Amino acid sequence: MKATLPKQASPRPESTGAEVLEIAQISMVVEDVLAATQFIDVHTHLFAPSFGKLGLWGIDELLTYHYLEAEFFRSSHTRPEQYFALSKTQQADAIWRALFVENTPISESTRGVVAVLKAFGLPTDRLDLAEARAFFQTQSLEDHIQRVFDMAGISLVVMTNDPLDPEEAPAWLNVAREHPQFRAALRIDKILRHWASNWQALDAQGYKVDAQASGKSAAEVQRFLFDWYQRMRPRYMAVSLPDTFFYPAETVSNRLLAEAVLPSCGELDLPLSLMIGVRPQANPALRLAGDAVGRADLRSLENLCRTFPKNRFLVSVLSRENQHELCVYARKFSNLMPFGCWWFMNNPSIVEEITRERIEMLGTSFIPQHSDARVLEQVIYKWSNTRRTLAPILSNAYRLLVDDGRSVTRNDIQRDVTRLFRSNAESWMNLNGH
Ligand code: FIX
Ligand code: ZN
């Protein structure tokens, strides 16, 4: 008897994505869509390869990240001045020993390094860093960047570019080259926060400005911004502002903001990114790790959005206590786009709280996260953390929607994830097509 082949199961019709999902299917589809969608990382401190040593990567940079330095000084008797007198390699060895050998790496930042080592198939429990260093030494940067971006599920990052940085500015004038996955952002902290110690640099470059920013200074600052716009083609201008920031108030900073920066952003059709709430150098001995957080008076946002309705404001706030206000202001002003869970907010328990609140109050009209990566490989764990934290939050939102009487499809979920992690940024930052 001729062997009868088992009856081929009739092939399930190709899923169009328009099929109504069962409640039980939602989590899996959400995870799938989050994993399959390449995100845009709207704020990083990464650099395209042509910027050379400005771009940080590899195990020693991962370990000497200021988030880990802050934790190191809590788990070691080494004083900051002793630590900063060490070489980068010695600093990395000291941090590895204190936080990964003598203690369990359970904090968000230490777990991040473990996740990166695991992602490259490297051991995570060695007493020393020999194997990890050997691995990173064999990587060629261009290929490594591509591999890291693929592992992180991101297609494009926005850098942080300071035209008054003595190392970076010459790079833009000499070596900087366009890169398909890196876009610029024109960072103007030195103009809006440190004018007293930086106006001389503009003056030296031929811009007629003075310490009081009087006379033609505002117009000259505009000229400076336009010149750097030509060089960098930034997607937005950006400034980090202290918790004491208030607008309006009679300050040189606010005058330059109103008379130079916002008019330039308007003419160049660029959003202004305001990152509000840092308490700079609460402990200067810790250097980059020395900044803290303070609750800001967000009525400044109300005043700016109302006074400059044609300007777009990308806003991230550092204080947990300011998150709800930011959501409410975003409901009042469509020229305000909340983005990211910045810095001390970038911990899964807080990301969950902020993101749930934003979905409940703003739907998908916000940008949930940015990595703020200072070291290339950090995008791997920061984005896998984001996907891991967002999946149950989004799934729960869809289950509630079904409960309330509206069915959900894969296409719905794909449209929402694309909006949250791509098209909101693309439309606000003219990133279309990338
Ligand atoms: O101002 C900023 O862009 C901050 O993100 C940084 O200054 C900060 O040091 C940082 O790395 C936060 O993650
Ligand atoms: Zn940053």
Image: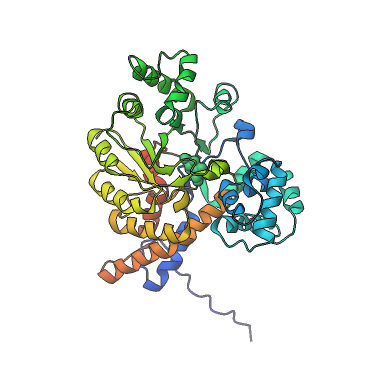
Give the answer, above or below, for where 88 lies relative to 397.
Answer: above
Image position, residue 79 (x, y; %): 64, 47
Residue at (45, 29) in percent of width and height: 190
Left or right: residue 381 compared with residue 39: right
Confirm whether residue 20 shows in the render: no
How is colour applied across the structure in the image? rainbow
Image position, residue 238 (x, y; %): 42, 35
Give the answer, above or below, for where 317 lies relative to 386.
Answer: above
Left or right: residue 400 compared with residue 162: left
Image position, residue 288 (x, y; %): 55, 41
Confirm whether residue 275 shows in the render: yes
Q: Residue 85, located in which quarter of the rendered image?
A: top right
Residue at (51, 58) in percent of width and height: 385
Q: Residue furthest bottom?
A: 1
Residue at (42, 20) in percent of width and height: 224
Image position, residue 312 (x, y; %): 31, 36
Give the answer, above or below, for where 286 lies relative to 5.
Answer: above
Please state which of residues 243 and 365 is positioned toward the viewer in this rendering.
243
Left or right: residue 40 compared with residue 2: left
Q: Quadrant of the N terminus?
A: bottom right
Total label count? 0
Please state which of residues 194 and 428 is positioned toward the viewer in this rendering.
194
